[in-house]
């Protein structure tokens, strides 16, 4: 009898430990709809320079509620969203592997080049319940160059977002933590696009 009681007590403890052993891969899939883009338009081809520090960035934290590490693949989510959104707003987007200036033989027919960097990231969540509020704060620095390497714009963008988790079993742990990040990324990219739309297109 005593042995059975020990098993009953140990079982939930073991389950908690096992649940906390694996890293939670925070899934993010930010997407800006055509309705949100509206009539925003850049009547030129733009360059997008994203270094490896930006595209490969992972932010690591810890969930007290799940007793598990968190892995946010911020770089992949951000670079995909930027590329997709600019492709739909500009006449064309070229991924470039270096900052301007460009030599005449490189033949980049670009109005300007956009270079994003992460400046800050923070997240928050309920310590006890999965249907509490999940939050995210993101900061980007975006530098815009003309083809000659002159800085046309250098700004820091900040966005906050909050999303309430649900007890729906179809909502994975990763997507609970990722939902506010999606919203914050979408806000920032729309702010970036608004500023790019307002840049006077240099003569090519």
Image: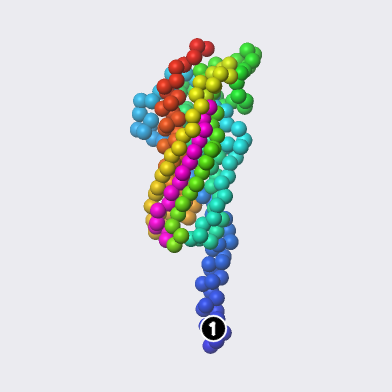
Residue at the image position 35 percent from the left and 33 percent from the top: 35
Residue at the image position 42 percent from the left and 32 percent from the top: 190
Q: Position of residue 140 (x, y in %)?
A: 50, 35
109 is within the stretch colored magenta = no
Q: Residues within 10 Å of mark 1 (few under 14, many from 20)?
A: few
Q: Main secondary structure of the magenta part?
A: strand
137 is within the stretch colored magenta = yes
Res 18 seen here:
yes
Res 179 seen here:
no
How was the colour assigned to the protein in this rendering?
rainbow
Residue at the image position 55 percent from the left and 86 percent from the top: 2
Position of residue 35 relative to residue 47, above or below, is: below
Residue at the image position 49 percent from the left and 14 percent from the top: 202
Residue stretch rendered in magenta on the structure: 129-143
Specify the quadrant of the image occupied by residue 158.
Answer: top left
Q: Which residue is mark 1?
A: 4
Position of residue 6 relative to residue 141, above or below, is: below
């Amino acid at each position: 009898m005593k042995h059975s009681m020990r098993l009953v007590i140990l079982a939930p403890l073991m389950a908690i430990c096992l649940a906390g052993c694996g890293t939670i891969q925070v899934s993010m899939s930010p997407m800006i709809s055509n309705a949100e883009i509206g009539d925003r338009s850049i009547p030129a081809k733009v360059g997008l320079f994203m270094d490896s520090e930006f595209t490969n960035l992972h932010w690591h934290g810890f969930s007290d509620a799940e007793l598990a590490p968190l892995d946010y693949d911020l770089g992949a989510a951000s670079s995909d969203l930027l590329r997709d959104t600019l492709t739909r707003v500009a006449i064309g987007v070229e991924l470039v592997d270096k900052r301007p200036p460009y030599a005449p033989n490189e033949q980049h027919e670009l109005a300007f080049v956009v270079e994003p960097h992460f400046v800050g990231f923070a997240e928050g969540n309920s310590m006890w319940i999965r249907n509490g509020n999940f939050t995210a704060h993101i900061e980007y620095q975006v530098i815009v160059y003309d083809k000659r390497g002159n800085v046309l714009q250098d700004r820091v963008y900040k966005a906050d977002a909050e999303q309430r988790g649900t007890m729906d079993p179809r909502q994975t742990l990763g997507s609970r933590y990722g939902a506010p990040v999606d919203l914050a990324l979408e806000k920032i990219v729309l702010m970036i696009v608004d500023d790019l739309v307002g840049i006077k297109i240099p003569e090519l």
